Image: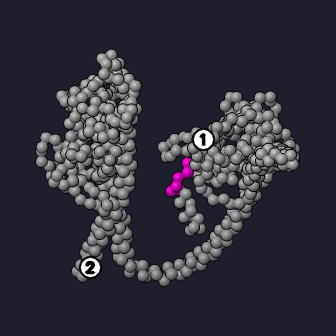
Amino acid sequence: MTQFHAHRWIILALLLGAVAAVAGGVYRLGYRQALDSLAERSAADLALASDRVTTQLQVYQELAVLMADHPTLKRLDRAEARVAAQGLLREVADKTAALDVFFVDRAGRVVVAAEGVMGRDVTQTGYFHRAMQGALGTGYGVLQPDGRRAYIYAAPDFDVDGRVRGALVVVADVEDVEQTWRGSLPAVFFTNRGGDVFIANRRELLFWQRSTEGPGLSPPDGRQVALRAWLEGPHEIWDLRWSPYLPERALHQAVNLPQIGMVGEILVDVAPAQRLAGLQAAAMAAIVLALGAMLALAIERRRTLAEANTVLESRVAARTRALSATNMRLTREVQERQEAEAALKRAQQDLVQAGKLSALGQMSAGISHELNQPLMAIQQYAENGEAFVARGKPERAGENLGRIAQMAGRMARIIKNLRAFARNESEPMGRVDLGQVITSAIELTEPRLRQDRVGLIWQPPAEPVFAWGGEVRLSQVFVNLINNAADAMLEQEQREIRIAIETRHDEADARLAVSVRDIGPGLKEPEKIFDPFYSTKAVGSSEGMGLGLSISYGLVQSFGGHIRGINTGDGAEFTVELDRWRAQADTDTQQQDEVA
């Protein structure tokens, strides 16, 4: 009995040691992963704060450059000219919230100023010497006696002979720049070349200094504080227990900002990462303890279970045979389901192709007319060119050949759109130029719209707008929507379609939305418009079988998008929402295709 108890205590000790080792490993791994995620978010926050500061300061930089050669500042040798210039500079300072705007001559003397906060002589400043060299000068400092922080831009003004005649200086109020982002992020601060905190979203951090004894900050009152830092993998952790305004332990990141001559830094509390890692370790310890308890219970009951082992083995064998039979049946059912899914997918592809061919059939008359016109024009220009050659007028014949080339290009574009629209292939998901897709769909439906006197308002975007989807299938969606809108207005005199692209934001990501609006009678039953074979056309009509919107709904869903139709009061509006294309999503799709 004594040996049995000793053996049990040994097993308990081994179990507790295993629990401690596993929990420690899980905590370490979870903490590292949480720090990686925290570092990504903090890097984004730091980049956002840096962009805000540099962008807001850039406004004053551009102000200095634009105002340097203002005509009012060209002749300041007369008193009335200086009065007018001072009024101009005060107006500019008031409208831009600048602390001061002033003009200095080559000797560094302030000729005219809005407020005069910098004194009458700036010859000892670095930004003045930089401007006198013909470049944009920058500087920063604390104004006396009010202690306001200022960032300074000095733009040179050149004379007609190319020499620098002076400089326009704009003094920006740093506190005004901080107002828009103060307190909205973790502790973010910007240190100047001397290591002083010059800009911060926490007022209590202003003028703290980078420590010379190691990583960390020292308060401006000269107090000595204990500084300690270490690396957790690639991440730098600061121990900040000496400051009530900062987290006890913080992840530190920094980015150099040469455009403003500072270093942007951020301190993010790692306590959430520690709590998450602790919860993961506690959960794993609980699981290991539960497994250990189950194992101990199994050992204790081993003798009892040994007596029932024979019966259990016979039951297991019977159960195994039953499971084998069930497994075979399930295998057959899975195979049948896979075959059914493959047949359904083929049927869906055939239905999509049928929809495209149906749309092509409806557009065939107009497209034939579009192709016939250039052919007749080509024949006429060719006969004219032959006549001009015979008359010895090669330049007129060349003009006709150029027009023939234009007509041929127009026909090639129409045929290219038709071939792209009609082909039946499984195109990969990827980047699609949404404006180009809509333009192609409009070119395909343009003959029909012209024949039915339907006006179309569409303004392509100035720059490409990339969406996530398939070009051919997406073109079919917009062809169906345009044709349906035109069909809805056939019974009325005024006919107009509007197409527009807009960007919508939600909590997850930015989405693209394309609206197709008509001025027809609207939707009779909006809840049924995407049902297969639902149609408002007369029974037996050759205009379609009510599959266009159903096919379009399935295509948009396959892109991860959404389509809906509503009544606007003066017609119907269909909205197609698509995800914006991202390079990472495209790479993931290619990797999945390679694995498949």
Instruction: Check disc 1 and give the amino acid type.
Output: Pro
Q: Quadrant of residue 66?
A: top left
Residue 319 vertical position relative to residue 531 in the rendered view, above or below: below
Residue 149, horizontal then vertical, whole percent = 25, 34
Which residues make up the magenta segment?
Answer: 579-585
Q: Which residue is mark 1?
A: 461
Is any part of residue 411 visible from this angle? no
Residue located 64% across and 72% down the image? 331
Tag 1 or tag 2, which sits nearer the N-term? 2
Residue 254 vertical position relative to residue 451 in the rendered view, above or below: below
User: Is the C-beta separation of discs 2 and 1 under 8 Å?
Assistant: no
Q: Which residue is mark 2?
A: 7
Residue 229, horizontal then vertical, whole percent = 22, 56
The answer to whether residue 177 is left or right of residue 444 is left
Q: Residue furthest front?
A: 392
Mark 2 or 1, which is nearer the eye? 1
How is the model colour-coded? one colour
The answer to whether residue 49 is left or right of residue 544 is left
Q: Quadrant of residue 596?
A: bottom right
Instruction: Check disc 2 and give the amino acid type.
Output: His
Q: Residue furthest top?
A: 80
Tally the marks. 2
Q: Nearer the viewer, residue 533 or 51?
A: 51
Q: Nearer the viewer, residue 338 or 218?
A: 218
Residue located 76% across and 41% down the image? 446
